[in-house]
Amino acid sequence: MDATKLLVSGLIVLGLLLMPVMARPAAAKADPGYEYFVEGSPEDVQTDTSPGFLLAGGSTDQDAAMQWLIEKSGDGDFVVIRASGTDAYNPYIYSELGMSVDSAATLIIKKERAAYDPFVIDRIQEAEALFIAGGNQWDYVRDWKGTPIEDAIHELVANGVPVGGTSAGLAILGEFVFSAEHETVTSPQALKNPYHPSVAIATDFLQLAYLKGVITDSHFVARDRMGRLLTFMARILNDGMANEVKAIAVNEKTALAVEADGSARFFGQGPVFFLNADTIPAVCEQAKPLTFDGAAVYKLDHESDTFDLGSWTGFGGTGYNLWVIDGEVYSDQEGGSIY
């Protein structure tokens, strides 16, 4: 074989060897388990913050309540965390509210592994305000409890950073949490069977000032949730989780703003309910309707009404009592309304 043919043959062989390498597609980037969106400065800024909690009942966010949270951030970096959904809060917070923040960012934490990701934890730790969006609270309990996200939230609170949540984000702020591990539950279902599989209550997640010994609920009057809340409280007492249990229930289009001293007022349509119970239910068993002495209730009806979480006393609102007999809720309010 002459030199020319030898060269051509060598090039053909070389081409055949290289073809699989050249045709091989580039390796896909590993899914980090989260998405991150930011409007404004991507750099961290540090501002003077004021502590507080915003407990929102779901549906339409209240502009005045979110402005209250932004003011407490010192116009710093406002971070929203959630397990699903979009970054729709970013433009709302950054520009639509007419406030000045350094940035508005959203972390959509889709996988449990993202709760250990240094980038995710850094973004949370750098927040001057943290807001937990709605969704499914089981995603939050399952994927965040006992992780660095839980630690980062506690660290923010300890450092005087304001924290808020709406709907599912509100559900996880109390010491006791309706976890929705087995989907949601209605008041009739819970009252008929306090040990219905969907009456799932979690503990040992967040431990926040003024919310110790408290369970929260949202979309309250709109979705007729008084019966199930009383059932949650009965279960906590019956199961020995606490000797006394309190509850904060916020209606849709309403947000309770809690100051550092425990004083609270609401923004929006209302009402907001504060419940307290310390008597073990007479009947709280599997597949048997609940019988329970119930709870003392204080209701805030007007934005001028206030409540002190430290002393658990209200001003300007309405106090009354509820009890449950054979799965039916009764009230001593005029007209017998449970709300």
Image (cartoon, rainbow, N blue to C red):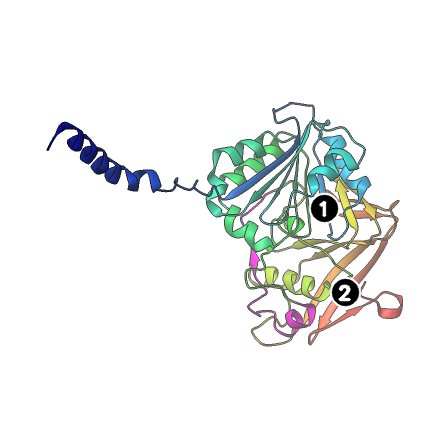
How far across and how far down the image is residue 201, in percent?
A: 57, 58
Q: Secondary structure at mark 1?
A: strand
204 up-or-down from 178: above or below: above
Question: Can residue 274 be seen at all in this image of the molecule?
Answer: yes
User: Is 43 in front, or is 182?
Assistant: 43
Q: Earlier in the sequence, mark 1 or mark 2?
A: 1
Q: In the image, what residue type sits under mark 1?
A: Leu
> Magenta region, mostly helix, strand or loop?
loop
Q: Is residue 305 left or right of residue 74?
A: right
Q: Which mark is residue 322?
A: 2
Point out residue 266 in the picture as x, y percentages from the top left corner. Answer: 81, 45
Tell me if 239 is positioned left or right of 129 in this view. left
Split into 4 quadrants, where in the image is the C terminus? bottom right
Q: Could you tell me how far apart the alpha carbons at marks 1 and 2 are, in whole angstroms?
A: 23 Å
Q: Looking at the picture, which amino acid does disc 2 mark? A: Leu
Q: Residue at x 87, y 46 (%)?
A: 303
Query: To which quarter of the image does residue 262 belong?
Result: top right
Mark 1 residue crowding within 10 angstroms, few (<14) / some (14–19) / many (20+): many
Kindly state the secondary structure of the residue where label 2 is placed: strand
Q: Residue at x 76, y 39 (%)?
A: 66
Magenta stretch, residue numbers = 186-207
- The residue positioned 78% from the left and 57% from the top of the image is 297
Residue 86 coordinates in the image, percent (x, y)? 64, 46
Magenta segment includes 188: yes
Front-most of residues 328 and 64: 64
Q: Which residue is mark 1?
A: 55
Mark 2 neighbour class, 10 Å CA radius: few under 14, some 14 to 19, many 20 or more: many
Does residue 261 appear anywhere in the picture? no
Position of the N terminus, as image quadrant, is top left
Residue 27 percent coordinates (x, y): 39, 41
Question: In the image, 326: left or right of 19?
Answer: right
